[in-house]
């Protein structure tokens, strides 16, 4: 496998916000947590792994034009935003909210007794975006290939999901030279660019034309994002 300039973000070293009804692990600096080793990667500003208690909700506001992605992992979520959009999502769907500066959204747990777990991802935009909200279906039973789940409104950032059998290999080719990559393992283990990655680990990669990866466990799942520096 080829090897590129990279930095790993270990799951066990993520900062954590924890309340009685909400828990969030932050791959990058977020809120009051500021660490020189946890700076965001290019335009990928937020990558949070959130758990929300039954009947609870979390409201957020973006400061700048931002592509917000919400990926349910366990249970279903209600999603609302200040553009008047309201939807229910389960695992296998991605909510993509192209938000202008100062817009708000809310994630709610509709269950009476169950926790929900979801990923919250922000990709900042330099230009004002046309506000939109779409729901993208992921075929989570499809295996051993990368499936597109996101393309930014300016077509300069992209996201992919893959579910792999053990020892299956893959290659990701960068679309736009100079873009950064961020790989996140949802479940299982992978070797990515000669680096071992386990559940909820992240890997930032620079100056790559392509990356190679291999699943080291069955039903291993990962995300790959490409975005401007």
Image (cartoon, grey):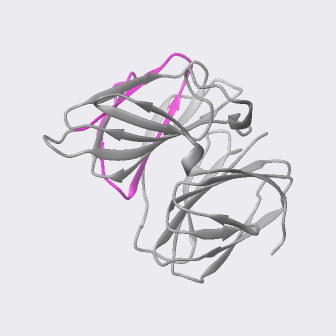
Front residue of 67/224: it is 224
Q: Give the magenta range.
A: 81-109
Q: Is residue 19 above or below residue 68?
A: above
**Which residue is outermost to the left?**
112
Query: Residue 151, how many percent across, how many down?
Result: 60, 48
Q: Quadrant of the C terminus?
A: top right
Q: Judge from the rendering whether residue 73 lies leftward or rightward of residue 127; answer left or right.
A: left
Query: Residue 41, how many percent across, how many down?
Result: 72, 40
Q: Judge from the rendering whether residue 184 lies leftward or rightward of residue 92; answer left or right.
A: right
Task: Name the residue located 76 percent from the left edge and 48 percent from the top edge.
Answer: 180
Q: Is residue 183 above or below residue 143?
A: above
Front residue of 82/41: it is 41
**Quadrant housing residue 70:** top left
Task: Name the residue located 25 percent from the left edge and 30 percent from the top edge.
Answer: 56
Residue 93 drawn in magenta: yes
Query: Residue 145, how many percent across, how many down?
Result: 57, 74
Q: Is residue 22 above or below residue 195?
A: above
Q: Judge from the rendering whether residue 196 lies leftward or rightward of residue 56; answer left or right.
A: right
**Quadrant housing residue 171:** bottom right
Query: Residue 52, how many percent across, how many down?
Result: 31, 37
Front residue of 125/218: it is 218
Q: Is residue 226 above or below residue 228?
A: below
Q: Quadrant of the N terminus?
A: bottom right
Task: Name the residue located 48 percent from the left edge and 78 percent from the top edge.
Answer: 218
**Which residue is outermost to the bottom?**
167
> How many numbered dots are placed on residues in this image?
0
**Quadrant housing residue 63:** top right
Residue 197 drawn in magenta: no
Q: Judge from the rendering whether residue 225 lies leftward or rightward of residue 60; answer left or right.
A: right
């Amino acid at each position: 496998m080829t090897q590129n300039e990279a930095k790993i973000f270990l799951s066990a070293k993520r900062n954590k916000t924890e309340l009685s009804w909400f828990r969030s692990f932050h791959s990058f600096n977020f809120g009051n947590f500021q660490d020189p080793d946890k700076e965001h990667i290019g335009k990928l500003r937020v990558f949070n792994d959130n758990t929300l208690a039954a009947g609870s909700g979390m409201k957020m506001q973006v400061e700048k034009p931002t592509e917000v992605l919400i990926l349910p992992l366990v249970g279903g979520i209600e999603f609302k935003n200040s553009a008047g959009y309201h939807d229910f999502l389960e695992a296998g769907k991605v909510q993509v909210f192209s938000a202008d500066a100062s817009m708000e959204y809310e994630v709610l747990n509709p269950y009476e007794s169950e926790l929900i777990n979801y990923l919250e991802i922000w990709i900042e935009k330099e230009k004002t975006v046309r506000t939109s909200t779409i729901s993208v279906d992921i075929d989570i039973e499809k295996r051993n290939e990368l499936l597109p789940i996101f393309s930014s409104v300016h077509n300069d950032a992209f996201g992919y999901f893959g579910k792999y059998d053990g020892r299956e290999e893959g290659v990701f080719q960068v679309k736009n030279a100079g873009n950064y990559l961020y790989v996140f393992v949802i479940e299982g283990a992978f070797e990515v660019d000669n680096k071992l990655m386990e559940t909820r680990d992240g890997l930032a990669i620079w100056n790559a034309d392509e990356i190679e990866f291999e699943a080291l466990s069955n039903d291993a799942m990962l995300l790959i994002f490409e975005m401007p520096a």
